[in-house]
Amino acid sequence: MQAQGGGAMVPATERTDIAVAAPPPMSIEEFRQRTALVKAVVAEMEIEVHYGQIPGTHDKNLWEPGAEYLRAAFRISWDYIVLVSEENFETWEFRYRHRAMALNPDGSVYSAWEGTAWSKERRFWCKKTCPKPCAQDHDPFGMEREMLPHNVSDRSLKRAFVAMIRNVTGTSGYFKMATGDDVESRKTTSTASGSAQSSPDSDKHPWLVTCPEHDVEWFQSEKMRSPGHKPDDGPWCNLPPVINRRARQGVDAAAGILGWDKKQADAWVKGEYNDTWSKLTPEDHISASAALGALAEKKLSETVIDEDEQTEGVQAEGHGTKGEIETVGELLQIAHERWGMSREQVCGALGQTSPTAIKKPYADRLAELETLRGTSDAGPTAEQKA
């Protein structure tokens, strides 16, 4: 509806409430079947196709293709109404609100969710290189002006639809957001110089900005499938395998502290991220390494042993000998016993941020500490024992 009276915004449809007729509760067997179906369907969904990664987290954002996938799997019938349609063709400002409704077999509504969109959102008007805030004194980016109201209205409906599907199917535990944003809105784009630029709103882990092995910034041209760089003295270095390798080292170290084998660590990853390690994104790899590292540090912090008992235990088991340090926990115990060092002090002395980052062999790390402390292998002093 075009603006009237000097370009004033005119609502085309007033918002009205809709009665919701909830279906009867499921039986226990029906609930179990539905839960199994949810897990099976989500397991088949693909990142960058059905959902995306929320920048800076391991959480997932459901996209319209994923919502359509879920709708087909659950055979959901739905409809929608336009609640608000404000259109001003003089200022090219458009605002819409839609309500998406899941329907019972008799056509009654049992769930409804709403979505909105405004033409002045950056996604409709600005290039990714536009400053924030942008004066928007240029044409809409990537479309003819005449297509603007259609695209804004379509986005409002998509947001309502995706939010409705996520909640009706009970997949909010898998997808923390349901914006309906498409793939391009989340992908890293390239500037004319070829260096990688991400959304200004995202806070990236340092490894996603700079290669942790060569201390060189990643870049991605239009023809590259993922960020990378070319070292001066070696083959091309790509981001995904580097992050995979580095993050896996952290996972394995944390698993060792927790007393887990590789199978148990992989099972934890699958349970937390609903996918196997090889299928996770670099962001998920980093997140998994940090999360499991936090669990390992928590276990270390909870392993508080009385100093006298600790001394007796270490000496009785022969841990005072450098060649028999098998775990990072034992290394921390010996450092505390000899020099009264805390976990943080040990990590700082060895140039690491956490115990899980301390590398084997631990006997060599103890030797480094001895050199730094200027001591021998003779054990704690009388003053430290006191």
Image (cartoon, rainbow, N blue to C red):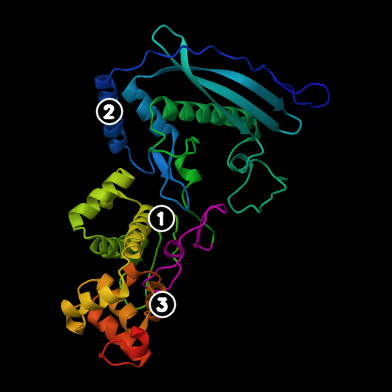
Instruction: Tell me which residue sits at (16%, 78%) in the image.
Output: 316
Could you tell me the amino acid type at mark 3? Gln
**Residue projecting furthest to the right:** 6
Residue 286 drawn above or below residue 270: below
Of labels 2 and 1, earlier in sequence is: 2
Dot in front, 3 or 2: 3
**In the rendered structure, does residue 12 fall within the stretch colored magenta?**
no
Element type where label 2 sits in the image: helix
- On the image, numbered disc 2 is attached to which residue? 37
Q: Nearer the viewer, residue 36 or 53?
A: 36
Q: Dot 1, crowdedness within 10 Å: few (<14), some or many (≥20)?
A: few
Q: Position of residue 116 (x, y in %)?
A: 59, 30
Q: Which quadrant: the N terminus? A: top right
Instruction: Tell me which residue sits at (18%, 53%) in the image.
Output: 263
Could you tell me the amino acid type at mark 1? Lys
Of labels 3 and 2, earlier in sequence is: 2
**In 3D space, how far apart are the residues under numbered discs 2 and 1 (Cα atoms)?**
38 Å
Element type where label 1 sits in the image: loop
Looking at the rendered structure, which numbered label has been put on residue 345? 3
Residue 194 drawn above or below residue 42: below
From where the camera sits, is residue 361 visible? no
- Specify whether 178 is left or right of 151: left
Residue 206 drawn above or below residue 173: below
Q: Quadrant of residue 256?
A: bottom left
Q: Position of residue 234 (x, y in %)?
A: 31, 75
Q: Quadrant of residue 175?
A: top left
- Name the dominant secondary structure of the magenta segment: loop
Which stretch is magenta? 193-217
Instruction: Tell me which residue sits at (66%, 52%) in the image.
Output: 132
Could you tell me the amino acid type at mark 2? Leu
**In 3D space, how far apart are the residues under numbered discs 3 and 2 (Cα atoms)?**
49 Å
Q: Nearer the viewer, residue 127 or 12?
A: 12
